[in-house]
Amino acid sequence: MYLAHGTLHPSAQAEATALLAALQARLPATLAARFDVETVLSCAEKFAAALDAQADGGDIDAASRAALSAFCRRDALAAKLERELGEAPFSLRRIGYDRQQFESWRPLGLVVHITPGNAALLPFFAMLESLLVGNVNWLRPSGSDDGRSARLLAEFLRHDAGGTLADYLAVLPLPGRDLSALFKPADAISAWGGATALAAIRLQAPAGCRWIDWGHRISFAYLVAEAADTAQLEALADEVCRLDQQACSSPQCVLVDSDEPEVLRRVGAQLAQALARRAPHWPALVPNEQEAAEISTQVAFARLDQSFGGIAGQIWQEPGWRVVWAHTPALAGSPLFRTVQLRPVPRAQLVAVLQPWRTQLQTCGLVAPARQLAELSQLLLAAGVSRVVPPAAMHDGYHGEPHDGVYALARLAKRASVTLPANNLAGHATLDLPPPPPAGLARHAIMNKADFQRNGVNERAQLFFRSGGSSGEPKLAGFSYRDYHRQMRAAADGLFAAGLDPRHDRVVNLLYGGELYGGLLSFFTILDKLSATHFPMGGPATEDCGDIARLIVQQRINTLVGMPGTIHRLFVQHEAMLREYGGVQKILLGGEHLNDAQRDFLAGFGIPLIRSAIYGSVDAGPLGHACAAGDDGVFHLMAETQWLEIVDPEHDRPAAPGGVGRLLFTSRAREGQTVARYELGDLGRWLPGDCACGLPTPRFELCGRYGQLMRVGTVYLNPAQMAEHIGAPVQFLIDYAANGCDRIEARVEGDIEQARSRMLLHPMLEQVIECGLLELEMVASDATQFARHPQSGKTPLVLDRRRAAARSGGTANVVEG
């Protein structure tokens, strides 16, 4: 059975010739196409779900179905990629933010797979592994495959919604006598088999083609006699019988850490008893005539050696199994079919005894006292063993485990590099193109804050930050550590694009942290990933910023990261000291907008770079970043980790081109909590055209807020909730105070002192007022005198005039109650 371009074809020589020609004709276009590993992960995930739902196996039994499902799980494949090739392996990124060189993993191209007949699922696993790194894969299965692999791969491709993977997988059961037509366009050949078979295949490989061989290996058990109890020996007997020693991980020999004949005799007798008990539990594979003759010959020669050579030894056997003790230190190959060699190898001789087999060693089942496990494991690895496991786990493995001492994906990929001239694309952490939109977004309803909190974190969440909860019990946003570090790396790339230079900048971090607020902690991680010189000072806990100013001068700090209110207050309080120092060159802001009065004041210190660097939220993480060419309030989307839609303010449809709309963010690959089409309460618009900085990611401009939450004086307030607590008609006017900090004028119909005390129940509001980050003024006013919306005539709960004050021609942000 042939498989080409997703279609099954019957075996026929004429058909094979035509299919091979068609595959070769399409190969250049397939290699040139942009490959997205997400397509593979999504297809495998759906295939695994279909296997789990399948009642009966058809072509495969229940055990095989379970093995396929476990291998194809999205988390298993993603973990395999990260373990074997590193984080974001296909991202063409700088090898260091201070370097001009970019590196990434890339596919080899066309890989031809030659697989054996003794492992039914191996061809599928080999093809999927190679597909995971983007290779085009042609499989030449064994003669015993009987179309199984073609049918299995065709079923896998049925779950590829876009149909793009069909060009990457083909099954071509061509005759083995001449594989040159199959090999001619190959960039690599991955072949499984014995030494003779592999040598014959390699002779047909074209020059320069990467040779990936998976030859036969030998495995054994190593016992310290005092630790060899009944349970350990029965586990070893099970591994001998489970696959009749046909697998590379099957124990062929039992080496004992002793050269005392009585010790070997006792171990041999105990192992024979264990085999007698356990062998009946495993169906036996019957050897053919040649294989049976090999067993008889080896047993006969062992008897001769013991009879005429004076060598200590013994043979224990029953129909179906045998233990052959020869008292000479050696690792010897077994004729298999439950034939176990028993040999003395004291640990002092272990490396020397194993040296002739070093290139073929695979697994050792180690039985030793706990206090000796570390020492003997190190010794076995030094001798050339690839795996050291308990006897019961010789045939088992774990996801991502190396195979025969190597990671398969590294053999199926190559490391590529790009070096740019100095200062070209200086702020670019990667040379990646933006990824395509997440699949299936249309199926998701728009998610608001309540939906986010109802959705809740899942069992993968490991790290939690406060999400709202400005009064009462805080709600939490959950991240796995993989989520967190992926998003912090994207934010580090963004800060680099915004102008931070880790080679030269000395950064003081003035963001607040604690009580589940992640500002200080997140930027600690971001600056760590940048390898920047970093002083994590935190936001000032008191009104006075003297310690911060002195630190800046003493440590020659040139870059400040913090909230506009914090940094503005620092320069107001210690103007003379900071003017005399004159070393601050960069101010990178987050959390709030910098108004014109603050900007003009700070610019008066001769600071060339003052910029809102990162835009984000606790719930969704970092969302956008500034660049060297953009205006304040303009951000590049962090496209590696986020997707953005801008929809009409009144209707759930895309906003008109250039029009202002609601921002909906979808987090890519968020494990700890689903964030899909999440509206944060911000308004914005797309900016057309390419950015002068050269980054290919789309740009958007923030245009104010809507909805319930407002950020004022570094904290989030819920005006509707505050109005409910006050219990009287109220309107909040938000503006800038004369000193540049935020100011709230609360107009209340009723007792203004009681209203003030109720407002200050907010856990952080009084603190930011005392620190000088916010002014609060209570004004008695008749509700009929509250300000009205100029267009609708409605009385809004909140009038935010900061954006109008900061940008000529802007409009106040309105939250209606």
Image (cartoon, rainbow, N blue to C red):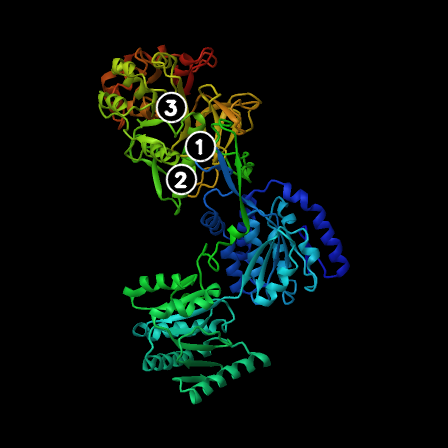
Where is the N terminus found, in terms of image quarters? bottom right
Q: Is residue 359 visible?
A: yes
Residue placed under numbered mark 3 in the picture:
588
Mark 2: amino acid: His
First in sequence: mark 2 or mark 1?
Answer: 2
The kind of secondary structure element at disc 2 is helix
In the rendered structure, are the residues bearing label 2 and label 1 in contact, judged by CB atoms less than 8 Å apart?
no
Mark 1, other Cα within 10 Å: few <14 / some 14–19 / many ≥20: many
Quadrant of residue 531 within the rendered picture? top left
Task: Find residue 493 and name its label.
Answer: 1
In the rendered structure, are the residues bearing label 1 and label 3 in contact, judged by CB atoms less than 8 Å apart?
no
Q: Measured along the vertical axis of the image, is residue 102 above or below residue 706?
A: below
Where is the C terminus found, in terms of image quarters? top left
Q: Is residue 194 visible?
A: no
Question: Which residue occupies 43% across, 80% down?
Answer: 323
On screen, residue 645 versus residue 572, left or right, reads: right
The kind of secondary structure element at disc 1 is helix
